[in-house]
């Protein structure tokens, strides 16, 4: 896959730490998590304690962030986890991490395309009396995402900032309404955060959905080359984004729980999960607020897709520049300074996946969504485990300042915690797949196949291009 191609660097000093935070939050799509994951977690998981489950997940990722941030000060490359794992564990492990990360991002993109296509179809039927098929809507959105992703990174940052502020504002308006109304039928309650509720039966199921709401941490490191003062910006953006996501999701989940009342919230989530938020928003505020929240779910999905497009493009760009994939992927637009060839490639792959699921008549919510999201979750958590293990190896093999907690203990503890989340997801695959036995086999098989392909490719490079293989990662570290 080696070859010659003229490359240009990505735009330098383009993003502040605050803009990077918007990219992280956009990738996570907090309103998507609230509307999509919270009703299911409450109805099928630990119920009243779901708000506390968000706090637990935030604590787990805080542990992961300790080593991640420590290493970010020495790694400045758009390949992010590929760069981290390669620097710590070597080129072979880095290639596995890269392949799995790409699978994760493509999986979550596919899930988001399915959801936005479905919600647009529903909205069209409601407003126009007829709607286009989900996959036609998804194709139209893919084109719009590509147009926005083609523009310079500052343009994407401004678009995401506007969408995120609207999304956060509507949820905070709902929280304020709950506070003004004095809670729900049982008033204010601390039950959602009590250990007896949080650690009740079903916590593992809730964590499967809750952990997915933190997807996108790598976004901070992906923009290291385009950040202003990256050593400082990446660290600040990571911790601010983590804190904001945890507070936002746990507060909003607490508010919806007390709005229904701890005694009634589980039954309400089980009865009508799709209308769970909108019904209460219309009751406590006004029907137009519920309608706005419904519309913002669509814009939240678009924001997530735009951020994911940027992330995948930069991954492919980094892989092309390294020579791990075709070098023409490292071409960037001479004026916009965006990875144009990589962006076009991932756009084509998205179109192909949407058309493939459309050709077999797959249901967007019952088939495309669970397959895409489960593959993404397992793949990304595996990459994060590898990245955590890479941290102590990186610092112990170099004459760099190191602290026992920051560079050894916290990363290894994070690896154990994240591995536990993988086990919980695998145990919950029948639930995620809606009881479809074929999906229970297909989901882990896809992840294993991607990892196996990466191992075979890494072996081929080692065997037939030994010098190239040994030099992988040489240009990843900052001086």
Image (tube, grey):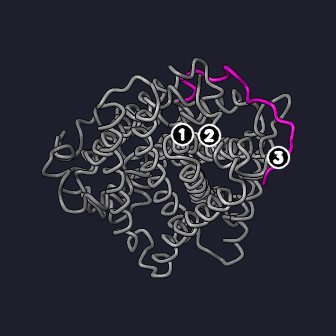
Q: Residue at x 20, y 43 (%)?
A: 193
Q: Nearer the viewer, residue 116 or 157?
A: 157
457 horizontally vs 166: left or right: right
Closer to viewer: mark 3 or mark 1: 1
Marks 1 and 2: CB-CB under 8 Å? yes
Question: Reading the chain from its start, which is encountered first: label 3 or label 1?
Answer: 1
Q: Nearer the viewer, residue 376 or 476?
A: 476
> Which residue position holds label 3?
328
> Which residue position holds label 2?
473
Question: Reading the chain from its start, which is encountered first: label 2 or label 3?
Answer: 3
Q: Residues within 10 Å of mark 3 (few under 14, many from 20)?
A: many
Question: Reading the chain from its start, which is encountered first: label 1 or label 2?
Answer: 1
As displayed, is residue 127 above or below residue 55? below
The circle drawn on residue 298 is none
As displayed, is residue 434 above or below residue 395? below
> Which residue position holds label 1?
87
Q: Residues within 10 Å of mark 1 (few under 14, many from 20)?
A: many
Q: Quadrant location of the C terminus?
A: top right
Label 3 element class: helix
Report the Cα–Cα distance between label 1 and label 2.
6 Å
As displayed, is residue 204 above or below residue 329? below
Report the Cα–Cα distance between label 3 and label 1.
24 Å
Dominant SS type (magenta): loop
> Is 246 contained in the magenta span?
no
């Amino acid at each position: 896959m080696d070859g010659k191609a003229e490359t240009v660097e990505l735009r330098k000093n383009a993003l502040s730490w605050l803009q990077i935070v918007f990219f992280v939050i956009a990738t996570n799509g907090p309103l998507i998590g609230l509307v999509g994951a919270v009703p299911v977690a409450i109805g099928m998981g630990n119920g009243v304690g779901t708000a506390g489950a968000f706090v637990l997940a935030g604590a787990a990722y805080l542990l992961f962030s300790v080593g991640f941030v420590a290493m970010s000060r020495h790694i400045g490359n758009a390949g992010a986890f590929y760069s981290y794992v390669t620097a710590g564990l070597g080129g072979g492990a880095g290639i596995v991490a890269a392949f799995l990360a790409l699978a994760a991002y493509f999986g979550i993109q596919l899930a988001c395309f399915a959801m936005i296509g479905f919600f647009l179809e529903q909205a069209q039927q409601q407003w126009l009396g007829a709607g286009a098929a989900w996959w036609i809507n998804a194709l139209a959105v893919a084109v719009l995402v590509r147009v926005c992703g083609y523009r310079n990174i500052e343009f994407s940052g401004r678009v995401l900032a506007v969408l995120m502020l609207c999304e956060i504002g509507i949820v905070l308006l709902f929280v304020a309404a709950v506070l003004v109304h004095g809670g729900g039928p049982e008033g204010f309650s601390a039950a959602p955060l009590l250990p007896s509720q949080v650690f009740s039966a079903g916590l593992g199921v809730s964590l499967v959905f809750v952990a997915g709401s933190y997807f996108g941490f790598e976004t901070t490191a992906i923009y290291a080359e385009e950040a202003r003062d990256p050593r400082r910006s990446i660290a600040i953006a990571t911790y601010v984004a983590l804190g904001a996501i945890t507070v936002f999701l746990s507060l909003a989940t607490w508010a919806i729980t007390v709005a229904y009342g701890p005694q009634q919230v589980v039954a309400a989530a089980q009865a009508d999960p799709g209308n769970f938020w909108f019904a209460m928003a219309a009751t406590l505020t006004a029907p137009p607020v519920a309608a706005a929240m419904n519309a913002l779910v669509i814009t939240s999905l678009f924001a997530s897709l735009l951020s994911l497009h940027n992330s995948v493009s930069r991954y492919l760009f980094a892989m092309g520049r390294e020579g791990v994939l075709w070098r023409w992927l490292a071409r960037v637009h001479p004026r916009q300074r965006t990875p144009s060839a990589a962006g076009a490639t991932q756009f084509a792959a998205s179109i192909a996946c949407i058309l493939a699921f459309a050709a077999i008549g797959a249901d967007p919510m019952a088939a495309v969504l669970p397959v895409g999201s489960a593959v993404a979750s397992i793949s990304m958590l595996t990459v994060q485990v590898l990245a955590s293990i890479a941290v102590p190896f990186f610092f112990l093999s170099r004459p760099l300042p190191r602290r026992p907690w920051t560079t050894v203990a916290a990363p290894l503890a994070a690896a154990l915690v994240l591995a536990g989340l993988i086990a919980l997801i695998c145990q919950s695959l029948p639930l995620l797949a809606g009881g479809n036995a074929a999906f229970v086999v297909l989901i882990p098989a896809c992840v294993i196949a991607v990892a196996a392909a990466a191992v075979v490719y890494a072996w081929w490079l080692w065997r037939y291009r030994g010098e190239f293989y040994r030099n992988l990662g040489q240009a990843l570290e900052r001086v």
